[in-house]
Amino acid sequence: MADEVKSPLCPRDLKLPGFVPGFLSQSTILAVYGSSSFLVVFFMWILSGRFHKKSKVNRVLMCWWIFTGLTHIILEGYFVFSPGFYKKTTPHYLAEVWKEYSKGDSRYAGRDSGVIAVEGITAVLEGPACLLAVYAIATKKSYNYILQVAICLGQLYGTAVYFITSILEGDNFAASPFYYFAYYVMANIWWVIIPTIIVIHCWKKICAAVNFQEQRKAKKG
Amino acid sequence: MADEVKSPLCPRDLKLPGFVPGFLSQSTILAVYGSSSFLVVFFMWILSGRFHKKSKVNRVLMCWWIFTGLTHIILEGYFVFSPGFYKKTTPHYLAEVWKEYSKGDSRYAGRDSGVIAVEGITAVLEGPACLLAVYAIATKKSYNYILQVAICLGQLYGTAVYFITSILEGDNFAASPFYYFAYYVMANIWWVIIPTIIVIHCWKKICAAVNFQEQRKAKKG
């Protein structure tokens, strides 16, 4: 019976009635995520090259925003709205992703409220905002920089809450040190590094624009 | 014995060994917070009037930022770094504030990790950033708008996590409907309404500046 399967997750006393172990191997899960992400990024790189006067920086940003936006909406959106993913008896790809990821952080299978709150905001608000950022960069909207800053700060705040709550609760949610570093640390660290770089980039652009406007006003005045 | 005092907080099974009920009345606590806040805001209003060409909007913003900044640093900072505030046997004002507020949300006394994470980010990062915002507005720094947006989004994200985690955990942390509305809802709703207004205000300013710069560039080009 499914109920009798002991979950391989940590902490060992975590109760997951109806837990069904994953069917797909780690390499299969990563290969599907990696290759579909590659296709999306490749498609965006080609498409962005067709826009008039798009700098390489903006093309890279568009690739990042489409990748992270789809990750937020599809992967994280599935997690938020599928509380019973760990009971799936058939190899549903998205359920498999979260069964596998839960080895690095069992709070996902355990439906920790902090994790759901952060993932919910990420999937419902930030995901669509990322797609809007692709559009805003492509069409040179005046709100493109501030939108990018807003999303990045949301990602950084979410990651901060994610790591701080884990530390406060004993930092004991990984099945092994390997999963701790490979999933919990390595899969999340990019959402600290890249948003930080983008915030700095866009922050400078905004300050330059505000400065430019102030100087012109001062000249006129 | 202090250990035997049953806490008046909700849920009733919340364990708070060593809990000591508050000494100060609700009206005393509010009077101290209200009058000291009034003094700070009054002082800032007078001071901001001495700056050259400060619009009324910017003067109101400076008053808000000094008020919310000091609230974050002093009140919320005390909470974050005083895990045993509910055991205080003498009437320490800041401990009294949180003993009283815990009637509206017992997760404060219960050291809920989501609440501590949000309050920690608010007290340590956003509090000092609010004081920087006062300085940035006073000295017309080019980063003043983006800084204000960044802090407001942090406050909005924090409040979202705060409310969502409570709902996910059963929304049963208030000692009575009065405390639920007076403390949990009313004391927090201002940090939803005011940051939203400021984000819209600064967002428009930034877009206008970016637009202005783009148009000038286009004219030259």
Image (cartoon, coloured by chain):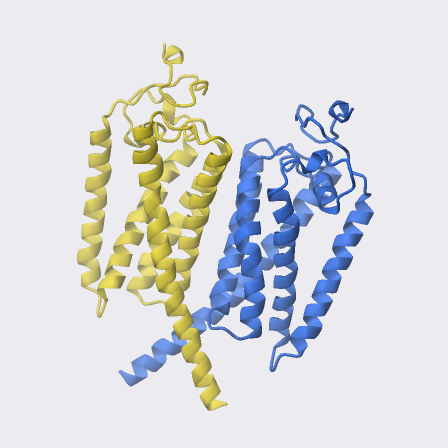
Chain colours: A yellow, B blue
In the depicted view, which residue is nearer to us: B159 or A160?
Answer: A160
Q: How many marks?
A: 0
Residue A160 showing in the rendered view: yes
| Residue beneath the point at 18% across and 63% down | A50
| Residue beneath the point at 74% across and 35% down | B176
Q: Position of residue A42 (x, y in %)?
A: 18, 51
Q: Is residue A44 above or below residue A120?
A: below
Residue A143 showing in the rendered view: no
Question: Residue A144, located in which quarter of the rendered image?
Answer: bottom left
| Quarter occupied by the N terminus of chain A | top left
| Residue beneath the point at 72% across and 59% down | B37
Q: Position of residue B73 (x, y in %)?
A: 61, 53
Residue positioned most to the bottom: A220
Q: Position of residue B16 (x, y in %)?
A: 67, 28
Q: Position of residue A189 (x, y in %)?
A: 34, 44
Q: Is residue B84 above or below residue B40?
A: above
| Residue beneath the point at 61% across and 48% down | B77
Q: Is residue B192 above or below residue A4?
A: below
In the depicted view, which residue is nearer to us: A201 or B167?
Answer: A201
